Image: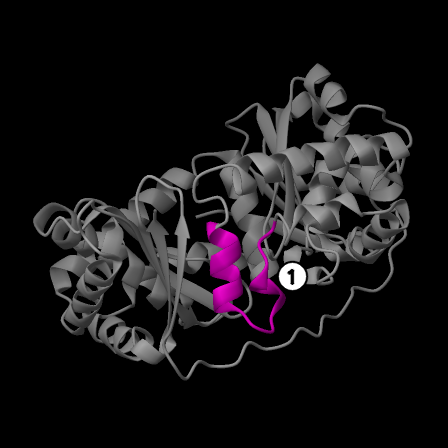
Amino acid sequence: MILFDRFVLPNGLKVLVNTDMSTPLVSMVVLYDVGAKDEDEEHTGFAHLFEHLMFGGSVNIANFDEALQLAGGSNNAYTTNDLTCYYCTLPAVNIETAFWLESDRMLSLAFTPKSLEVQRSVVIEEFKEHYLNAPYGDLYHLVHALNYKVHPYRWPTIGKNVEQIERATMEDVRSFFAAHYYPANAILVLSGGITTEQVQQLCDKWFAPIPSPAKLQRSLPIEPRRTEYVREVVERDVPSSLLYMSFQMPGRRSKDYVIYDMLTDILSLGRGGRLNAELVRKQGLFSSVDASVDGTIETGLVSISGMVMEGVTLEEAEEGVWKELGRLSRISEEELRRIQNLYETDALYQELRSSRRAELLAEYELYGDANAVNRRVQERAEVTTQMLEACAATTFTRENCRSLHYRAK
């Protein structure tokens, strides 16, 4: 169990504190409620670009990383379609350095032409290296566009294309910052050798003086329900053909999310996963295969993807997947206990690290209730085989499927 205190500053910043005096370290997470879904279709990739810009220095601090490293800390960040998360870990005696750094860039990020050009170049090189010049690099651009027609999930976090990042102006950057980077749109979490009283004092000193507008209220289009099977076929110069099948599912805040997550565990968790046992080891249709949920807050996807063995057609591979999905009409109690036990073990292991505890608390607070982090094991314990079978029957249907055949030349 992750015990924590919670309070909210007058400017709207939510603060959560998990005290663990057994460690001399403290992990800090600053999670902003902004992701790729908040971008304009003609200005995509901005959330990810901003992740980089936030390390370019603030008005009072020329080099974020250097200051933190001198205090014995390490840090990083990540961006998704739903959120942007900055995290660091450092000795508890130096934790005020993290408060100073994070509050200063929240209040007064340095918008300099040099910083924009440097970080723009970094992002463009990342785009070219991982998405334009790498095998399967365009896979997620294809998957997003195939599965979403109206919702902004239809482009990946990196953005639709390099050109939009190249065209980003200083005015664009300032506007994006003003719209999303302020206390009422953020969650601050501390985990480790620090008390709630210490955190309150440091928050009053460093974060409370930062002004904040009211939190932005989104009005995103709702992705319509599917009514027909769609297959897209592309041909690329890649080593092996790849199959990617996606099915529409509720978002992360749905009470049924856990059922979809557990279905993917039945299919692919460990060597006991059905897809690996049947389609890889027994039938030899795939060299590797996986099932996953994307965990997005809005309407999401449960997907099955795999590298097809040489000599096997994508049509044969897909038919093999359909047969395995049909077999989900019967799930044994033994299978259910296996994935429940594996999840509980993993959950307990995650809670040993202050950095992961901080991330979990921030994520669950964004989903609506940080207390739910302590119910996640019990939620899975309450799921029955009948619930899993019923969910599989209504989800894994032809009309709910978007299938991408990524054919090797």
Q: Position of residue 59 (x, y in %)?
A: 91, 32
Residue that extends furthest to the top in the rendered view of this protein: 70
**Which SS type dominates the magenta stretch?**
helix
- Residue type marked 1: Lys
Name the side, left or right, on which 97 lies relative to 79.
Answer: right
- Callout 1: SS: helix
User: Does residue 250 appear left or right of residue 87 in this picture?
Assistant: left
Q: Is 302 drawn above or below residue 119 in the view shown?
A: below
Q: Is residue 55 visible?
A: no
Quick check: can you spot residue 63? yes
Measuring 51% from the left and 70% from the top, which residue is drawn there?
299
Q: Residues within 10 Å of mark 1 (few under 14, many from 20)?
A: many
Residue 70 position (above or below residue 142): above
Task: Report which quarter residue 332 is drawn in.
Answer: bottom left
Q: Write down the residue under mark 1.
A: 37
Residue 245 in the image: state x and y as whole percent.
Answer: 35, 63
Count how many numbered circles sit on residues in the image. 1
Is residue 80 within the magenta segment? no
Find the residue positioned furthest to the left. 282
Query: In this image, 23 relative to 65: left or right?
Result: left
Nearest the viewer among 67 and 326 is 326
Q: Tell me residue 141's x, y (percent).
A: 53, 55
Asked if the magenta segment contains residue 146, the reply would be yes
* Quarter assignment of residue 364: bottom right
Residue under the image location 81 percent in, 43 percent down: 106
Residue at left offset 81%, top offset 53%: 176
Tell me: 14 left or right of 273: right
Q: From the top left corner, tell me how far across and down residue 164 is, in percent.
A: 73, 51
Q: Residue furthest front?
A: 409
Q: Which residues are magenta?
A: 139-157
Vertically, is 28 above or below 153? above
